[in-house]
Each structure stands twice: as structure tokens, then as C-alpha cells.
Image: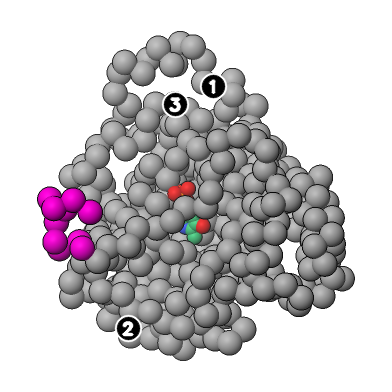
Amino acid sequence: MSQYFTKSLAALEPYTPGEQPRDQQYIKLNTNESPFAASPRVVAAITGQEVEKLRLYSDPACRDLIAAIAARNRIRPEQVMVGNGSDEVLAFALRAFCDGDTPLAYSDITYGCYKVWCSLMGIPSKVIPLQEDYTVDIGQYKSLGATIMLTNPNAPTGLALTPGQVEEVLKANPDHVVIVDEAYVDFGAESCLPLIDKYPNLLVVQTFSKSRNLAGARLGFAMGDPELIADLNRIKFSFNPYNVNRLTSLAGIAAMEDEEYFASCTGKIRENRAWTAQKLREMDFTLTDSLTNFLFAQSSRIEGGALAKALRQKGILVRHFEGERVSNRLRITIGSRPEMEALIEALKQLGA
Ligand SMILES: *Cc1c(COP(=O)(O)O)cnc(C)c1O
């Protein structure tokens, strides 16, 4: 930290992303990316002519992209806002709906960025512990006096709430926004999107990074009541009006329109998840019933951190988190079938 860095952020501890090696010598099961290429329609959309048009700013209102997202989800464009990854959308939502007097409530075991954004923006955190089996106790989300973040399905646990459970939270907190982070919803959980017409305090956030194979394009979106969307745009136009670049916008439209490829990729991930989970269970691993593109797995023989290191030496990257109830586990992204076969083989060789 230089002598110039603001003292007000002296305690800030940034998020540590999973390793992104510069060469392809590793099987990457550590950052929940898709093992499959972006849709062929995305590849076709990024032409030389479009690259030349980078001399022009992107559409600050993102009209074409928002129209594509709205059409696919059968909602109105006024109910959609887009951002540079769902990370940006979520950060804008915190800026819009939290402050020093309005904390953010979220689980003790969940996506690490929420805590970092709170400390960056001076927002108090109201941390609510998951139960022993990593499930959410909905009873703890009543009249919290806080903006609420429900990660559904949750990461790294892989477990989901039903829309009925989310609805209970919405009803019990009518004076606060409930943000549902659905980064993994397309792999088998039920979306809360149908509730946005009924609950003006619901904001559903999704991403193109995982189920639409576009992590590197940086594109996420929020869906909710037009007034909440206008609030998010108020923040966006006070920070970075051209937050989605031209090429990403084209990629997003093409990916949203390629329903068949989306269904095929997410279907294969579910198949590979079932296959891998069964193999791991046969090897006495403990697993949660993940509805995501990753497994949250514990070896009965080798401690989590040691196993992650040993796998790395065998050319396989997985994610390991420190912390009392997670450090014995690994978060393993579901890759292609050959990748998952290589993982199982490596685990057998290691005696895990
Ligand atoms: C991956 C992830 C995000 C961020 O996704 P981007 O759209 O790539 O910024 C947000 N929330 C959760 C829970 C995630 O796992």
C-alpha cells in the first residue's frame, strides 16, 4: 500500500480469483467456466467489420442486447439492466440498495465478493450462518432490516432454495430489496424470475459467464421491477455509461438467441455432473446435491488443501477455500467428460 492509498480503505481485503494459467497445460476445474466453446453464432457475429466499429462508443442504453434478453425471458425491456459481468451488476445493486444504515445480509458460506464490496462501499454486513448441512434456514431471513442477498443456487455449496422459499423472504421483507444471484440457475434449479411481476422488491441477477460459455466477454444482467432497473441505471450512468462494449453486446445477443446450443451445453454439464458425482461417491467422497456446474466434495482420506495441491501437480486445477466449514472440501467445476475421467483417474492414483 502506498502512502497515498486512502486510509479509509486500509482494511480492504480484495477478492482472490481462481488461478488463470497462461498456457493450457492444466485441466481447469477451478473457476466454474464452461468447457465448451462459445456458440458458433457468437463466433459468426464478431466480424472484422464489427471490430472496425470499435472506433465508436457502444450504445449506452444497450437496446439490442436488452431486447434479446427480454424476448428470451418473456419480460419487458424496462425490466432488464446489463453490466460488465454480473459482478458489476451486483456491485451497482449494493451501491443502489445499501448504505451505512442499510446492511447487506448474506450467508457465512457464499460467494466471496459480497463481503469485499461491502467493505469497499462502507456497507455493514449481516452474516447469517448456514445450517450444519449447508442449507439456508429461511426462518432467519424475517424482518432483517437489511437488503438481502440470496445466492441461488449457492456457491460453493451447490444447494438451492425453491422459489416458494424465496417468496417467503420477499413477503417478510417488503421494505427491502431481495437480490437473488442466479449465476448457476441454468444447471438445474428453478428461477425466481416469474416472481418479478408480483414483488417490486425482487431483483434477479444472472450471467453469461457460466451457462452461456462467455466468461471472458464479461456480461451479466438484472431483471426486476422497472423502478429497480431505473435505480441501477442511475448508478451505472453515474459510474460508467458505456459499461458493456460493442463486441460483448453482439456476443450476448447471439448467445441468447442460440437456445439449442445453450440447452445442449447445459444438458451435457448435468450429465457429466451426475457421472462424476457417482464416481466420487463410489470412492467414499462426501458430496452435497449440487444443482450447479460444480461439485462441493470432501475426500474421506485426504484433507482438502493437500488434495488440491496434489491434483495441481498432476495438472488439474480445482478450487480450495480456507475457512472452518469449507477447508476440508474442494469445489470442482464440471468439465467435459474426458476432463472428468482424468480427474477421477488422478484421484485414484492419489489414493483419495
Ligand atoms: C461467477 C459468479 C458471479 C460473477 O459472474 P460474472 O458474471 O462473471 O461477473 C456472481 N455470483 C456468483 C455466485 C458467481 O459464482
Task: Write down the region rendered in magenta.
Answer: 1-10
Q: In front: 285, or 127?
A: 285
The percent coordinates of residue 325 (x first, y second) are 55, 79
For disc 1, the neighbor class at 10 Å (few under 14, some 14 to 19, many from 20) is some
Q: In front: 144, or 288?
A: 288
Tell me which amino acid carries mark 1. Ala
State whether residue 14 appears in this view.
yes
Residue 133 appears in which quarter of the rendering?
A: bottom right
Label 3 element class: helix
Label 2 element class: loop
Q: Tell me: 27 left or right of 98.
A: right
State whether residue 98 appears in this view.
no
For disc 2, the neighbor class at 10 Å (few under 14, some 14 to 19, many from 20) is some
Tell me which amino acid carries mark 3. Leu
Q: Tell me: 105 left or right of 220.
A: left
Tell me which amino acid carries mark 2. Leu
The percent coordinates of residue 40 (x first, y second) are 65, 27
Residue 144: image tag = 2
Q: Which residue is mark 1?
A: 45
What is the quadrant of the C terminus in the image? bottom right
The percent coordinates of residue 260 (x first, y second) are 69, 38
Measuring 65% from the left and 67% from the top, which residue is drawn there? 306
Q: In front: 237, or 292?
A: 292
Measuring 57% from the left and 28% from the top, which residue is drawn there? 42
Residue at mark 1 to residue at mark 3: CA–CA distance? 9 Å
